[in-house]
Image (cartoon, helix red, strand yellow):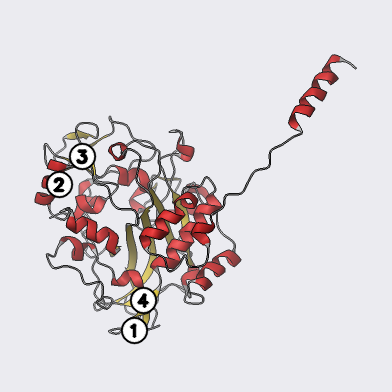
Amino acid sequence: MPRVFKGLATAAFILVPAVPVMAQDYSGCTADGWLDKSDEAFAADCAGMAFSDSLEDRERVAWMFFARVNQLIQDPDGDGMSGSGQVPVWMAWPTDPDTFDSAQPFDFGDPPRNEMLPSTEKKDILAGRIATEDPDGANEEVTRNKTSYDYLVSSGLTTKRDVAAFFDENDYVDMPVGSVELKASWLQVPDGTQAPEGALTFAFESDTYWWRGIHIMVKMQPLPDPAQMFYSEEPSWFWTTFEFNDNPGVGHVREDLTTQRAPLSETAIAGILETAGLSGFGFEAYAPNGTQIRFTKGGTGETPVILGHTDMEDFAGSPNTAQPRYWTGFEASCHSCHATAAYHPGTKAFFPFSVPTGALDPGYNKADKDGIVRYLGQGYKPLDFMWPIAFQAR
């Protein structure tokens, strides 16, 4: 037999005994009872699946989180979402104003609010843009679960004075596993108009709004070295953002610009919503734009992960921020942006808001409102991806 065939025969022999790829067992996350677990237990049990290399596994976790935070409760003082008499449980969670603007402890037993309580967004001002419209114009409400609320309040992270005291004793913020932070986007339904077909609505005291979507971020596990939050590709938070499926341009953004998305089948989605008792309510009109667990794809430091919401991160779209269907670029990255949430104990100042994508390094910098360039590596301490501390501490 000629030498070349002999070599091929040897190679074929070596390749024959293939080792089967074993499917990961995530039954601890997905088994019956997943809906009723505490946030802490669910996060701990689902960390492996949430941080899987399989985008399909991560998308399923995203839908499970979506189902958990949207568990329906009665709205005794209002008509509920879309006139149902019920609202998602997160509408009874503390908002940013409840957390940072009040010395009174939040009562988790109170009925859901009927008042619009948006966060006063500082990102436009900090990025050098001045908002000329009503300060309520963004209509973005940040809410958090009890795990997150209790840590922020008990650690003294709600006032600038107490943040300074915190960093006299600590080198970083380390939110507890099971912390859940949400940001909902609403848009007013003006008189004489209607919400988009299929969109869920809510009649606040001020007016009726339709729900454009929600960011979900959950602390799943601590980092091996929390001091490296700025730079570590080890995952700790799980990020996803759900958006109304008929938002203008969202299909283009999902298919062409966000980078880690693996849509579940309608059957799989229906199964999750049915298990959660949410079938037919209208949540089927929303879906994830993707998921994110680190700065870059595979943690190699090369390809940035892109994830955002076309309304909440419209400032990151180009060339025309107001028209996502024409965007050729989307510089939005939940993990990278939140990673720069930081505090400098020496200057007692927070790192300027910016919108980075990809991995960070100590030379990453941004000019503050006075035009002074601040470098991340010059003494800033991590806030564990928690921009609310920087934006809201009074």
Q: Residues within 10 Å of mark 2 (few under 14, many from 20)?
A: some
Tell me the quadrant of the picture where the N terminus can be found: top right
Q: CA distance from mark 1 to mark 4?
A: 9 Å
- For marks 1 and 2, the one nearer the N-term is 1
Q: Amino acid type of disc 3?
A: Asp
- Measured as percent of width and height from the top left, residue 277 is found at 48, 75
Q: Is residue 362 left or right of residue 270?
A: left
Q: Nearer the viewer, mark 4 or mark 3?
A: 3
Label placed on residue 166: 2
- For marks 4 and 3, the one nearer the N-term is 4
The residue at which mark 1 appears reads as: 79
Please determine whether, in this image, residue 297 is positioned above or below residue 242.
above
| CB under 8 Å between discs 1 and 4 | no
Q: CA distance from mark 3 to mark 1?
A: 47 Å
The residue at which mark 4 appears reads as: 87
Tell me the quarter of the picture where residue 195 sits. Answer: bottom left
- For marks 3 and 1, the one nearer the N-term is 1
Q: CA distance from mark 2 to mark 3?
A: 9 Å
Q: Residues within 10 Å of mark 4 (few under 14, many from 20)?
A: many
- Outermost residue toward the left? 161
Q: Nearer the viewer, mark 1 or mark 4?
A: 4
Q: CA distance from mark 4 to mark 2?
A: 36 Å
| CB under 8 Å between discs 2 and 3 | no
